[in-house]
Amino acid sequence: MKRTLLSVVIANTLLVSTTAFASDRGFAPEDTFFDDALNFGGHVGSSVEYEYKTTTDWAKWGATESTEQTRTHEVVSLFYRNSKWNFSTLYAFKLEDRKKEQTGYSETEDGYIHLLSIDKGFNFGSGWGVGSVYDIEYSRSQIYSTSGTNGLRHTTVEHSFRPYLTYWSNDFGAGFYSNLEYLLNDEDKSEWGKIKEEGYSLLFKPYKRLGNWELGVEFFYQIKENENNGKKVSDFTEKYVEPIVQYSFDDAGTMYVRARIGENETSGIGSNDDYFKDIRKATIGYEQAVGEDWLMKAEYEWAKDTETSNAAQYAGDEKVVEQNTLFLQALYRF
C-alpha cells in the first residue's frame, strides 16, 4: 500500500500496543453508542510526494536511459480514531501526475486516487492485542504518448486484508508488530490489456526502546501470481530485511533512518526464463510537533534495483532502476 497508509496504520497500532493493551475496557451502564462515538481523536492532513526515477535498459536494447517523474498530491486525508472501540479509519483523496521520457518517446499520465482504510483491534491484556485492517484503493487516470496514445483509460482497484498480532512489554521496553496480508490488485489499461495480481505476505517487526532510542528490524516475505488478460504469466516472490533506528529529541521532534536489503524473483510460466532483482533502499525522515495541534513530517528516500536474468539473450547483462523520492506532510490533530 501507499506510504501514508502504512505509516498511519502501523504507527497507530504500535501506539496502541504501548498504552491501551495494559488495560481492558468494560462498558458502564450509562455508556451509549453516541457517547462512545464522540470520544475520539484524529487528524486532517495533506501531503505531497515527488519521485524521480532513472532506468537504464538492458544492453541488448541499447542500454537506453529513460526518466520518469511522478508527483502525488494528497489533497486531504481524514483520520478518525476511537480508543474506546479500539477502532480507526482513514480516507484520503489524491491527485497524481506522471511523465516518462526517453529518446524518441514521451508519455504522460494524469489521474486521481481514493483510499479507504478500516482498522479494528481487540485487547487481551498483558500487552497482547490482535486486529485486522482492510484497505481499498481506487485510481483512475488517462495516458497520452507521442506514439499516438490519446486519453487511454487506466483504472486500478487494490484490496488488502491484514490480520495482525501485537505485543508490548513494559518490563522489557520491547514488543513486536506482525501481520499476514492477502492482496488483490486489478489493473485495466483498456486496449493495452488487463493485469491481475493476487498474493500473500508476512511481516514481522520486533522493536526495543532504550531511553530516547528505538531500535527495530522489519522482516518481509511475499508471494504473488500475475495474470495478463486472464492468463497466468508469472510467479513472483520477494523478501527483505529492513533495520530501523529512531531517536526522539527531548526538546524537538523524532528522527529515523531505515535501510532495506532485499531481493525478488519473477518466474515465467511456460518458459525457463527467470528475472532477479537486488533491492537496496535507504530512508531518512524527521517528524516535528508544531504547537499543540500540528505535526509536520519530511522524508527522503533513495532506492536502487538491479535486475538480471538467466535468459540467454540477457547473459551478463543487467537493467538498473534508481529512484529518489521526497515526501512532505502536514497534519492537524484533534
Image (tube, grey):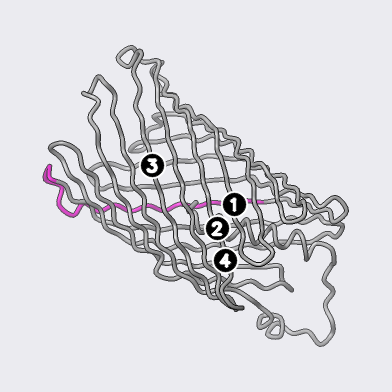
Q: Position of residue 219 (x, y in %)?
A: 64, 38
Query: On the rendered structure, is 10 left or right of 330?
Result: right
C-alpha gap between disc 1 and disc 2? 6 Å
Q: Position of residue 137 (x, y in %)?
A: 45, 57
Q: Residue at x 30, y 49 (%)?
A: 69
Mark 4 secondary-structure assignment: strand
Image quarter of residue 84: bottom right
At horizontal 58% and vertical 77% (from top left) the residue drawn is 291
For the residues bearing labels 1 and 2, Cβ distance under 8 angstroms: yes
Mark number displayed over residue 256: 1
Q: Is residue 303 above or below residue 9?
A: above
Q: Is residue 286 magenta?
A: no
Q: Where is residue 221, by image quadrant? A: top right
Q: Which residues are magenta?
A: 146-163
Residue type at numbered disc 1: Tyr
- Decide which of tag 4 and tag 1 comes sooner along the chain: 1
Magenta stretch secondary structure, dominant: strand
- Residue at image position (84%, 82%) is 28
Q: Which residue is mark 3?
A: 323
| Helix, strand or loop under label 3 | strand
Q: Which residue is mark 4?
A: 288
Is 162 magenta? The answer is: yes
